Image (spheres, rainbow, N blue to C red):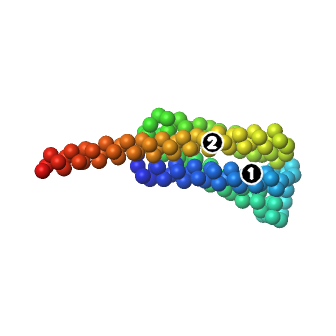
C-alpha cells in the first residue's frame, strides 16, 4: 500500500465528512429553496451566481460536492489500478456507484423539500461516507501489516549480515 494512496482515501473521507456537515447546514437553512423549481440553476445573475447568503450556501455545497465526487471517483480508479485488496476496491466502488444516486437525491431535495427527501439524501451520503471510512481503515491496516513484515525482513537481513 502506497502512502500516496492512503492519503488519497483519507483526504477523500475527510472531504466526504465535511460535505455532509455542509449539507446539513444547507438543508437546515433551506438554501436549496433559493433554487425553487429551476434546478440546476438558482437565483442570481442568469441563475448562475449567488444573489444572497442562502444561494451562496447552495452553490458552495455544490462546489464542494463536485470536488468530493471527483475525489471519490479518483480513489476508486486508484484502488482498481493499484490492485489493492478486494475489500478496498469494493468499498470505493460502492461509494462511486451510490454517487450518481446521491446527486439525483440532492436535486430531489430542491423539488420536494421535506423530511423524506432529506432523509434519503443524507442516508445515501452516510452510505458513501461509510464506504470511504472502510476503505481508509483497510488501507491503513493493510499497510501496517506490510510495513511490519518489511521491517522484520529488513531486521533479519541486517542480523544475517552481521
Q: Quadrant of residue 145?
A: top left
Mark 1, other Cα within 10 Å: few <14 / some 14–19 / many ≥20: some
Foreground: 45 or 83?
83
Identify residue for label 1: 24
Cα distance in 3D space between marks 2 and 1: 15 Å
Disc marking residue 128: 2
7 or 110, which is in the foreground?
7
Q: Which one is earlier in the sequence, the residue at label 2 or at label 1?
A: 1
Mark toward the viewer: 2 or 1: 1
Residue 18 x %, y %: 65, 54
Identify the residue at image location x=80%, y=53%.
Answer: 28
Count of numbered tags: 2
Q: Residue at x 45, y 46 (%)?
A: 140
Answer few, some or many: residues within 10 Å of disc 2's Cα (few below 14, many 20 plus, some between 14 and 19): many
- Badge 1 marks a residue whose secondary structure is helix
SS for callout 2 = helix
Based on the displayed image, in which of its 4 quarters is residue 153 positioned?
Answer: top left
Amino acid at each position: 500500500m502506497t502512502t500516496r494512496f492512503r492519503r488519497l482515501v483519507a483526504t477523500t473521507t475527510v472531504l466526504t465528512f465535511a460535505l455532509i456537515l455542509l449539507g446539513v447546514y444547507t438543508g437546515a437553512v433551506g438554501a436549496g429553496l433559493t433554487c425553487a423549481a429551476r434546478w440546476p440553476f438558482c437565483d442570481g445573475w442568469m441563475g448562475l451566481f449567488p444573489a444572497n447568503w442562502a444561494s451562496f450556501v447552495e452553490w458552495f455545497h455544490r462546489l464542494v460536492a463536485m470536488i468530493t465526487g471527483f475525489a471519490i471517483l479518483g480513489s476508486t480508479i486508484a484502488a482498481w489500478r493499484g490492485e489493492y485488496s478486494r475489500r478496498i476496491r469494493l468499498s470505493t466502488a460502492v461509494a462511486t456507484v451510490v454517487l450518481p444516486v446521491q446527486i439525483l437525491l440532492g436535486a430531489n431535495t430542491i423539488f420536494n423539500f421535506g423530511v423524506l427527501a432529506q432523509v434519503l439524501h443524507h442516508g445515501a451520503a452516510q452510505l458513501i461516507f461509510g464506504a470511504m471510512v472502510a476503505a481508509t481503515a483497510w488501507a491503513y491496516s493493510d499497510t501496517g501489516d506490510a510495513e511490519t513484515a518489511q521491517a522484520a525482513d529488513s531486521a533479519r537481513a541486517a542480523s544475517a549480515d552481521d
